[in-house]
Image (cartoon, helix red, strand yellow):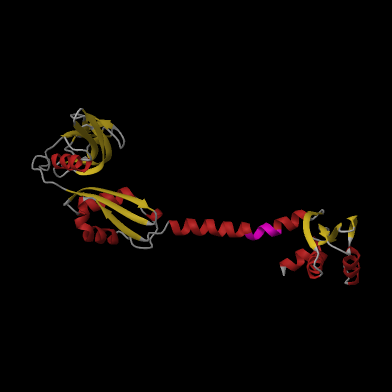
């Protein structure tokens, strides 16, 4: 109904201009007039070419007539005071479709379609899923409804076999990266008042439950740097407390492997991996150089190093 109102009332001033080519153009002109079409600004350029303007209501009929009588016809422009109404109407569907698409994209991109696990702590996948379920983190729940850091803390608190948990949104999946805990009597006796870096690297994630963090995610640290100190400030008073915290550091090491054989990059990496024992490797690269009759392979390895006390 709205479309018909626009066509009949508001678009009377819109004109469409055509160029028509073919033999016996008078035949087309007379036939159009006999069918009640009003031809405006009629101009013959030659016996085989003319320009003509029609109202928007007559344009479709004229176009169909020209095709019916085998004339070549092409619309070259639109004009008129109410042309902007037509343009707005023609674009309305595109605009509405674009808005619907954007809204639906935003809506569906916020839904959790599934879960994925990575890291050595993946062996406790079922326990982690149960914990997530208890917190309402389920399939088709919204990512925006949850605080990832609180979820990470909750999982760590409920599963003593894990020492590191990181949750990220990957597309429409919730990825849970975790690492197994390695028991240490000194670190877990409850009488530790500081957490010190044991390697050079970059802080990936720091969780402090008691104590004061002296670094943040992304900070470069050196071996021996104090990361968490055993104090807190209460009403402007500094109180000494034991530390309960965990830090994940991305450390880097290089390993040299020399061989008489070419193409030994894989062997070089395996040797480096063996030297790192059970460390979780995040990234590595192998650079090969030739020195006389020998090949040198330098393996750069980034790995995750976990420190936890409390």
Residue name at image x 34 percent, y 50 percent: 168
Depth check, front residue: 39 or 227: 39
Residue name at image x 79 percent, y 70 percent: 68
Depth check, front residue: 236 or 96: 96
- Residue lying farthest bottom? 35
- Residue lying farthest left? 185
Q: Write down the quadrant of residue 108 in the picture.
A: bottom left
Tell me the quadrant of the picture where the C terminus can be found.
top left
Q: Write down the quadrant of residue 54 in the picture.
A: bottom right
Say above or below: 187 vs 23.
above
Depth check, front residue: 58 or 72: 72
- Residue lying farthest top? 292
Q: Where is residue 240 in the image (x, y as percent from the top left)?
A: 18, 33
The secondary structure that dominates the magenta segment is helix
Q: Where is residue 262 in the image (x, y as percent from the top left)?
A: 21, 38
Q: Where is residue 216 in the image (x, y as percent from the top left)?
A: 30, 35
Residue 120 located within the stretch drawn in magenta: no
Q: Where is residue 260 in the image (x, y as percent from the top left)?
A: 16, 35
How many marks on residues?
A: 0
- Residue lying farthest front? 293
Q: Confirm whether residue 233 shows in the render.
A: no
Residue name at image x 56 percent, y 60 percent: 100
In the displayed structure image, the side of residue 32 where residue 256 appears, left or right: left
Q: Write down the quadrant of residue 217 in the picture.
A: top left
Q: Confirm whether residue 122 shows in the render.
A: yes
Tell me the quadrant of the picture where the N terminus can be found.
bottom right
Specify start and end residues of the magenta stretch as a single range: 89-93
């Amino acid at each position: 109904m709205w479309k018909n109102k626009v066509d009949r009332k508001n678009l009377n001033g819109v004109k469409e201009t055509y160029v028509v080519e073919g033999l016996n153009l008078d035949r087309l002109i007379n036939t159009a007039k006999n069918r009640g079409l009003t031809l405006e600004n009629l101009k013959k350029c030659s016996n085989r070419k003319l320009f003509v303007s029609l109202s928007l209501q007559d344009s479709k009929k004229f176009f169909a007539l020209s095709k019916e009588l085998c004339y070549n016809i092409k619309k070259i422009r639109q004009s008129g005071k109410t042309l902007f109404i037509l343009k707005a109407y023609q674009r309305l569907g595109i605009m509405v479709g674009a808005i619907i698409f954007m809204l639906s994209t935003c809506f569906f991109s916020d839904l959790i379609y599934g879960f994925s696990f990575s890291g050595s702590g993946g062996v406790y996948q079922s326990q982690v899923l149960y914990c997530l379920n208890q917190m309402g983190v389920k399939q088709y729940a919204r990512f925006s409804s949850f605080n990832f850091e609180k979820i990470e803390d909750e999982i760590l608190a409920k599963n003593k076999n894990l020492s590191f948990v990181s949750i990220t949104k990957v597309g429409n999946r919730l990825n849970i990266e975790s690492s197994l805990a390695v028991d240490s009597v000194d670190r877990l006796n409850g009488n530790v008042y500081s957490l010190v870096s044991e390697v050079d690297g970059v802080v990936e994630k720091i969780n402090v439950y008691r104590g004061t963090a002296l670094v943040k995610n992304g900070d470069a640290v050196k071996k021996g740097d104090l990361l968490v100190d055993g104090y807190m400030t209460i009403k402007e008073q500094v109180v000494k407390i034991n530390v309960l915290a965990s830090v994940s550091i991305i450390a880097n090491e290089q390993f040299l492997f020399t061989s008489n054989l070419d193409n030994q990059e894989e062997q070089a990496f395996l040797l480096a991996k063996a030297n790192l024992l059970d460390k979780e490797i995040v990234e590595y690269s192998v650079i090969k150089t030739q020195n006389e009759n020998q090949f040198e392979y330098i393996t750069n390895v980034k790995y995750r190093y976990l420190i936890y006390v409390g």
